[in-house]
Amino acid sequence: MKDKRLGQWGEATAERYLRCDKHYVIVYRNYRNALGEIDLIAVDKDTIVFVEVKTRRSRCCGRPAEAVESRKQHKIIQVAKSYLSRFGLWERPCRFDVVEVAAVRETVEINHICNAFAETRRF
């Protein structure tokens, strides 16, 4: 699978997991603005959840979430701020999750990390 297709597959897998297993409402997939992109924006009860999805074919290079380093976190936070401003949602609680999707051999492994970075409302 090519990298772009792998990423799209991982995002679709994460979306299905969040929607079906966690009962999140998916609001946006690949939300983009001039500042960057957020893979998924969802609602978990009353909380807006900004989700970064990291997909890998193996674990040989470490955990997928390790790729969400401080620079990437900062960029996601800036896009999230813009989103909250654009839609007047500053009063809503929010958080940042990472969903790791690993396609290892014939199995799919999903690891959902809630509150992966930037404590709620400290950004």
Image (cartoon, rainbow, N blue to C red):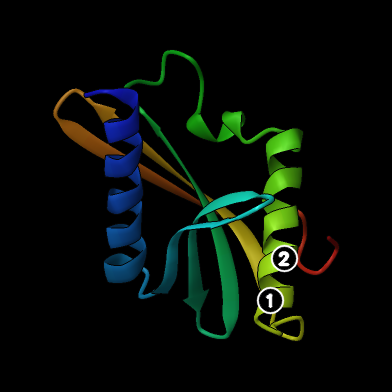
Residue at coordinates 71% horizontally, 45% vertically from top-left?
75
> Which residue is the site of mark 2?
82
Residue 24 coordinates in the image, percent (x, y): 41, 74
Q: Residue at x 76, y 67 (%)?
A: 120
Quick check: 61 above or below 17?
above
Q: Position of residue 49 (x, y in %)?
A: 57, 67
Q: Residue 43: horizontal and vertical position, in percent? A: 50, 76
Task: Work out which quarter of the rendered image holds the C terminus and state it.
Answer: bottom right
SS assignment at label 1: helix
Could you say which quadrant of the image residue 56 lies in? top left
In the image, residue 31 above or below residue 48 = above
Dot 1 alpha-carbon crowd within 10 angstroms: few under 14, some 14 to 19, many 20 or more: few
* Mark 1 residue type: Arg
Query: Which image quarter: residue 17?
Result: bottom left
Q: Residues within 10 Å of mark 2 (few under 14, many from 20)?
A: some
The residues bearing labels 1 and 2 have C-alpha atoms spaced at a distance of: 6 Å
Of the residues shown, which amino acid type is indicated by label 2? Ser
**In the rendered image, which residue does mark 1 sit on?**
86
Name the image quarter holding the N terminus.
top left
User: With 7 as the anchor, is 1 left or right in this view?
Assistant: left
| Label 1–label 2 contact, CB within 8 A | yes
Whether residue 12 sits left or right of residue 45 in the image: it is left
Is residue 2 placed above or below 8 in the rendered structure? above
Position of residue 47 in the picture relative to residue 30 (left or right): right
Comparing 36 with 108, the one in front is 36
Q: Position of residue 69 (x, y in %)?
A: 69, 33
Q: Is residue 80 visible?
A: yes
